[in-house]
Amino acid sequence: MRAHIQFKYILNQNHHETLSFKFENPIVDQIAQNIDEVAPLIDQAEYYQTLGYYVVLTLPYESAKAFNKAFDVHEDVENFGSLQVYKEPVTDFSEDTSHNQIVKWNSIDSDETLSQNIKDIQYEITNGNTYQVNYTTRLKAKSIDNPYEYYRFLTYESNGNYVAYIENSEENIISISPELFFQTGPHETLEHCILTKPMKGTIERGSTLQEDDDHYQWLANSSKDKAENVMIVDLLRNDLTKISKPGTVETVNLFMIEAYKTVFQMTSTVRSEMQKNLRLYNILEALFPCGSITGAPKEATMKVIQRLEKTPRKIYCGTIGLLLPDGRKVFSVPIRTVLNTKKEAVYGVGAGITIDSRADDEIKEFKMKTKILEHSEQSLIETMRIEDGLVKRREVHTERVIKGAEALNIDLNIAHWHKHLDDATRECCSGTFKLRIEINHSGVFKMNIQELADNNKPLTAKLMLSTNAPYIYRTNKTTARRQFDHNHETDVVLFYDDHNELTEFDIGNLVLKYENEYITPIYKGQFLNGCMRQSLLDNGVIKERKINKSDLFNKDIEVYMINSLREWTKIDLKF
């Protein structure tokens, strides 16, 4: 049994501490098998914390009944909470080197069912039974063979601030949550502060810098999302008054926008000074479950949720807590969370429904929030040309691989990189060779060397509209190549964007020769900046300029593809 927790502890408005711990072999491993065991489990967690241990506590959404018998939840769950106690963190796990299978997720609800349930919620709102419902659905997949590697893949793909991997003999929790439930401990000038940060309001990231900024501004000014957010802020303020010193509850940083890989999220922060001698149970009794994943008012809204959601939420929308020996506590809201069992893997996704919600938009939001599951694990690639024992453009390749490793969160050992290049040059001391190095997300190198035939014949190319691939895959050379797929009617394809501006080939950059001048498209993060291209720019051989599709029809234009392997290749365009 083991756990890997990476939580953010907010110190003040501008600074935070990253709490990153790996644990193995707990000295205590407990499960609450019925609702009556939840309170003792929480007390045990706090007891071991006072003894100086690290404690990981999980409570599923269905444990809410332990705090309020009126909360309506599904009760057919395997456990109502788990507790793991550790003496100290470990430096690392013994890694399982097996690869993940491809995980294919399927929704348990059709779009028609989702749409009808959203209409039912709005009927409840019209009748005054609720103001807002955080309605959720599930995706399912086959059981994941190597859940820790899948966790590593998801954390590699996502920048959640409250991520956790927790395993026991029956299940694995893989949580890539961006949302804080609450933290207790020192904050700014308060010694005994409790701070919550509800997240409500979402929009997809843009596929260009301009579109990204437009989406950011749209969310920042969205009256609908602000209304949803402030409802939950008011609910949490009310919850906090039950455990706070009078007059200390305050809202700070209202309607802040946070950027994640696939979405922007709106958050607000509510904090207060806690009453003295509070038990952890008292805090959870006042706050659990978090209002951002129920809606308002909480008790009535949970009845609507229980009626419409046919399966239990379990750890999704419950809480994961880290209790530190120094007395601090941090609890997340486990959204963006996979529960993996021997039978299946389940992923929950939801959205806040109000009277102004449109079913089509909410269903789009459901699908948008599953995008972190879509990307397969990718490696960084560098393809280089060796001539007579020298790697051409070695410094440019090295600079790019360092930047790529940083962007993809790859643990790059630069000494290993140079050793592989040196080994390759010793092996290829005479002739011309292709050197391909692949570095996976664990920093493991794979090297391949092939003799390169001298072939200067032109290649055929056709035009193709580029896809809106994620920025990280457009600007780094990785094994993610779907955006370059084509039917190979021609040797290569030349891409253009929605504005009819030419961008790149599938295996190289574009250069046009016109009146003894060599020009290449202006780089704005829309394609891979190749090492050959960068080297030619640095040496003044080529210049950047906007190039449109229409420029290709000039009969005096010569078209070239450049890359670091074959350098210059004449292109024969097929329109």
Image (cartoon, rainbow, N blue to C red):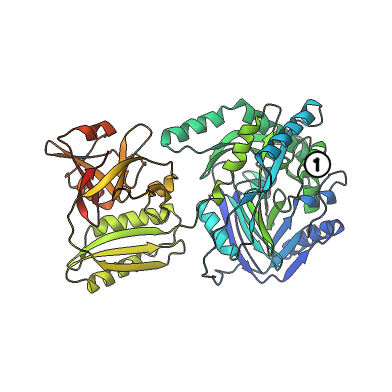
> Where is the C terminus found, in terms of image quarters?
top left
Closer to the camera, 215 or 304?
304
Can the viewer see residue 462?
Answer: yes
Q: Quadrant of residue 361?
A: top right
Closer to the camera, 7 or 216?
216
Seen in the picture, residue 275 relative to 18 is either above or below; the reply is above
Q: Residues within 10 Å of mark 1 (few under 14, many from 20)?
A: few
Q: Residue furthest front?
A: 489
Q: Is residue 130 left or right of residue 189?
A: right
**Circle 1 sits on which residue?**
307
Under circle 1, the secondary element is helix
Where's residue 65, x and y in %? 84, 49
Where's residue 4, x and y in %? 60, 62
Seen in the picture, residue 123 relative to 486 is either above or below; the reply is above
> Looking at the image, which residue is at 42% across and 44% down?
471
Q: Residue furthest left?
A: 516
> Looking at the image, which residue is at 42% across and 37% down?
208
Q: Is residue 273 left or right of residue 221?
A: right
Q: Quadrant of residue 110?
A: top right
Seen in the picture, residue 297 relative to 452 is either above or below; the reply is above
Looking at numbered disc 1 in the image, what kind of residue is underneath it?
Arg
Where's residue 470, x and y in %? 45, 45
